[in-house]
Image: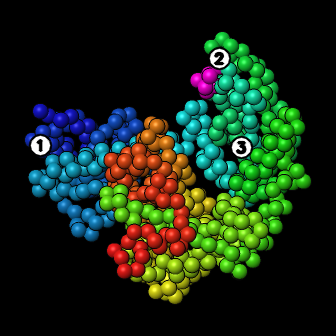
Amino acid sequence: MSRSLRTLIVEDSENDAMLLVKELQRGGYEAVFARVDTRETMHAELKQKDWDIVFADFTMPRFNAFAALQLLHETDLDLPFIIVSGTIGEDRAVQAMKAGAHDYILKDNMRRLVPAVDRELREAKNRLERKQAERTIRHLAFYDSLTDLPNRTLFRNQAQQAIHDGVADGRLVALLLMDLQRFKEVNDTLGHQRGDQLLQQVGARLREAMFESDMVARLGGDEFGILLPRMATMRDIDIVARKIHSVLETPLFIEEIPIVVEASLGAAIAPEHGTDADILLQHADVAMYHAKDTGASFVLYDPARDPHSPRRLALMAELRQAIEHNQLIVHYQPKIALDTGKMIGAEALVRWQHPKDGMIPPDQFIQSAENTGLIRPLTDWVLSTGLRQCFDALSRDAMQHLAVNISVRSLHDLRFPDLVDRLLKASGIPPEKLMLEVTESAFMVDLQRTVETLAVLSHMGVMISIDDFGTGFSSLNYIKKLPINEIKIDKSFVSDMTSDENDLSIVRSIIELGHNLGLKVVAEGVENKAVLDSLAALGCDHCQGYFISHPLPHERFMAWPGLAPGKT
């Protein structure tokens, strides 16, 4: 049975074009074709019709294969491009392949034509499937499934970019957080389904009220975020706040039930209140809760009303002393191979044993350490301590690797690779035993510098893992070019994958894409056997989480089966 093939032939000889068509027919293809021999006619055909494949003669009086290939790239079409020529030198053939041609066939050896077409059509189909999977992952990972608005991750990323651009251009950028008042009463009275319908209508009204350049996002629950990247004056934020309250004044109807929505708004402005998206979100959150507490409709952030700032500053001063006086400790969370159940490595996680406040979790000091520059001595301490404490297990191959989280600031520090090299040499641990985990957000800040640093570390032999995969960096076109060995699926997708179809789809797609890129895939946040079994069925390589083990102090971690000296 013939297979239809929409064929665009770039050829000045009608006889040669027909010979090509006949060869396709002998191979089982029914070629629906057009012949072109100029840039203008090729452009018209690409614009007017859909094609499966392009064949091009190498040289023609008014056109050539390189110009045809360039035009194809300009149209952003991913079609197999095969050169069919009477003569082509080896150097020119190599040059054409580097330019993007998929194969070249000599006209006196047309037996290669059909096998090449079969192969390139399969490859084109695979590329299309990968791109579709990437688009699916991006949408599921960056958009709220209920309202189809951007989610917290995308909002945070866009806010950081807007702040960066605004500071560079001398523009004001505002973040607003909005929380619906008494939303719990709607859920309790009318049910969660009607509560969801209410959130959808609120999201739609907010989106309609904003300018195209503004972003409206659902951050979770009944909390929405609004990004204003192009404020002209401080007065603009008051205008927007009044506009939001105005569009919510008209009752919403849920199954003919009128519901009046009231909201509390808090805002923070860059650069006055900070130039980091997380800090600005935190400040907007402080302002929003002050609005809720006081009954105000809108509150702009005021540092004098922020109960956290003074304590944070004091904590950073104490953290410097904690690093110098060894008040920090490292806990280790085992990573296991899903096919064998055996421990293959561990992630080093820093904890702070404060002399007065007791154990301080990392989320209370890591971000502030990065903002203040203390992250460099902190990273130095964690790396050196982890390598020293795990030396025996690593040198005996009881552990394949030790994983350590690396901050954005460290990756942008030109001295960081030298620090890692010095610590590895001092510990005697081979570079391939160290796995550095990098969050996707690192690529959003300064892609070029991050890639350069990773390339140096990879050249040293150090393993690289992308942590929290699916929550920040959006394009696999970049990731497939990075010198990475592993991706870690963020726990926000893993924890509910057995009950949430969206999360399951994301996890499945990430595992498939990771393996297609030749990478190991790790799932973090495994908290029950159902999730563990589901990951194993999907072919995930490694996992970690509370179901396997909580992070353990060094002494308890070394008692893990197979780690104690003299045991296997």
Image quadrant where one finds the C terminus: bottom left
Return the disc, 3 or 2, that comes first in the chain's sequence: 3
Q: Residue at x 66, y 25 (%)?
A: 187
* In the image, residue 95 above or below residue 65: below
State the residue at coordinates (14%, 34%). Answer: 2
Q: Is residue 131 magenta?
A: no
Q: Can you identify the residue that label 1 sits on? A: 27
Separation of disc 3 and disc 2 at Cα? 28 Å
Residue pointed to by mark 3:
227
C-beta proximity under 8 Å, tags 3 and 2: no
Mark 1 residue crowding within 10 angstroms, few (<14) / some (14–19) / many (20+): some
Mark 2, Cα crowd under 10 Å, few <14 / some 14-19 / many 20+, is some
Tag 3: amino acid: Leu
In the image, which disc is placed on residue 254? 2
Tell whether label 1 touches label 3 (CB within 8 Å): no
Kindly tell me whether residue 243 is visible in this rendering.
yes
Q: Secondary structure at mark 3?
A: strand
Up-down: is 499 above or below 111? above
Choose mark 3 or mark 1, whichever is in front.
3
Amino acid found under the numbered disc labelled 1: Gly
State the extent of the magenta-drawn residues as a range.
190-197
Distance between the Cα atoms at labels 2 and 1? 61 Å
Position in image of residue 396 (x %, y %): 37, 80
Q: Would residue 381 appear left or right of 530 to someone viewing this image?
A: right
Q: Nearer the viewer, residue 420 or 63?
A: 420
Q: Judge left or right: residue 198 versus residue 397.
A: right
Residue occupying the point 59% across, 74% down: 382
